Image (tube, rainbow, N blue to C red):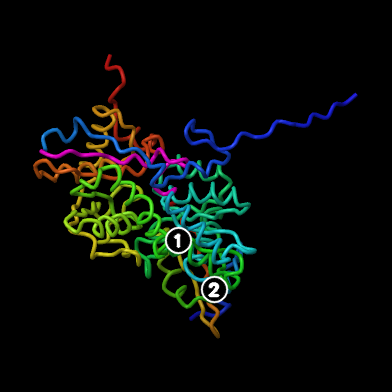
Amino acid sequence: MTTQTDVPNTHETLDTSGLLCPLPVYKAGMVLGRLEPGQVLELICTDPGSLQDIPAMARQRGDTLVASEDLNGTQRFWIEKGTKQ
Amino acid sequence: MTTTVTSEVEPLETDRSVRRYEDIRQLLPDVDNPTPLVQLNQVVAGNQITAYLKLEWLNPFGSLKDRAATYLMAGMQERGDLEGRDIVEASSGNTAIALAALAALAGKSLTVTIPSEVPAEKRTMLRMLGAEVWETPDDLCPVDHPKDGAIALARSIAAQDGGSRFALANQYENEDNVRAHYETTGPEIWRQTEGRISYFVAGFGTTGTITGVGRYLKERNPAIRVIAVEPQPGHRLPGLKSFQEAKQPGILDWDVIDDVLRVDDEDAYEATKQLHRREGLIVGPSTGAVVHGIRQIDDHGKIVVGISPDSGTKYTSYFEHILGDEGQPQI
């Protein structure tokens, strides 16, 4: 778990609260697709499956999961868009 | 001066004898309006069988899936699933194309999740029909659904907002899919072959066809052998599924299946090209897979029927790659 102080500057926030996987993965992929390399997406999820799926998605896409937290059933991920896409 | 023109001409009624219809849905198949059964005269010539293909691409919306979509739509309407809701479905294209047309006719819209390797022709056709198309990598959700990303995504879209916005047609789990083939495709084949069919061959996809037709035929004659064609893992044969990598649909009934033949992409595409060039049948690659399966049957004098799910016109972008420089002047 990380704290907010570790979190880099966020360029866009996507709140997928209430959505079940893989919808958060899909929507996050669409937003990351339009970000520039090095920009960071803050992703908010409530599906526990996100704890596995979001890191897997970031690895698969070549992005970097720079921070995450899991508090009271709400997960936050900060994903930096990779350069090789 | 403006003139208002009102038609006083009564519309002509449907008359099947001259192929005149009041509504496109009246062209949907049934035992009295079957899709054609056409004999293969060249590509299985070495076998001692008489083989036929059932040309499902001559259905009004262009594929075998017109049948399932019709039954799925009717089931949703009968259950009241569509009251205040639109439709979402995972599809490799053909079910969605038929559903999109039927939904439009019913004043509904379709959201479709579609594997990203599906040819561009199908994705564009869906958008032409007014559907919203969510292109989905199969490995979208690698943890829980390693090869079924589109299906998982359709489920999650249906579940949002407490399920109040979308009804999931759910061809992989919905018995209406099986019933479509039990009540139409099976009886058509039985009648068209005068009950003399010995083998039925179809690809594994949603498995609605092989389960429904297989069940019907085996009830009429338990000796009929039902053969499934399954692609290899990592295949490029849209509409077909390898259950070595994809989840088996809930509607699959192994009791009606006698054998499973595995087919490589290369063999399927080679058979597809031969169907184009030697039989004049402009079919898609899943038909080639079925015909490759038919070629494994060598049972003297027996009648074999295979399913030709759709036409080659939706796969021209695939064949651009497969053909290489074939058909271009070599100067």
Residues A2 and B307: in front is B307
Residue for point 49% across, 30% down: B18
Question: How many neighbours does mark 1 have within 10 angstroms: few (below 14), some (14-19), or many (20 or more)?
Answer: many
Residue B319, above or below B122: above
* Quarter residue B45 falls in: top left
Q: Please, is residue B186 above or below residue B303 in the view?
A: below
Inspect the magenta stretch and tell me whether residue B118 lies in it: no
Mark 2 crowdedness (10 Å alpha carbons): few <14, some 14-19, many ≥20: many
Q: Are marks 2 and 1 on the same chain?
A: yes
Which of B107 and B232 lies nearest the eye of the viewer?
B107
Span shown in magenta: B48-66
Mark sitting on residue A54: none
Circle 1 is placed at which residue position?
A: A63
Residue corresponding to mark 2: A45
> Which of the two labelled residues, at mark 2 and mark 1, occupies the earlier sequence position?
2
Query: Residue B316 location, x and y as percent?
Result: 38, 34
Subunit that carries the residue with mark 2: A
A39 relative to B264 in the view: left or right: right
Q: Chain of mark 1?
A: A
Q: Determine the residue positioned at 28% across, 53% down.
A: B234
Instruction: Find residue B128 and report its image quarter.
Output: top right
Q: Amino acid at mark 1?
A: Asp
Residue B58 within the magenta-colored segment of the rendering: yes
Could you say where residue B224 lies in the image, as x and y percent from the top left? 19, 54
Q: Quadrant of residue B6?
A: top right
Q: Is residue B138 above or below residue B25?
A: below
Eye-nearest disc, 2 or 1: 2
Report the amino acid beneath label 2: Cys
**Relative horizontal placement of residue A38, taking residue B275 as reference (left or right):** right
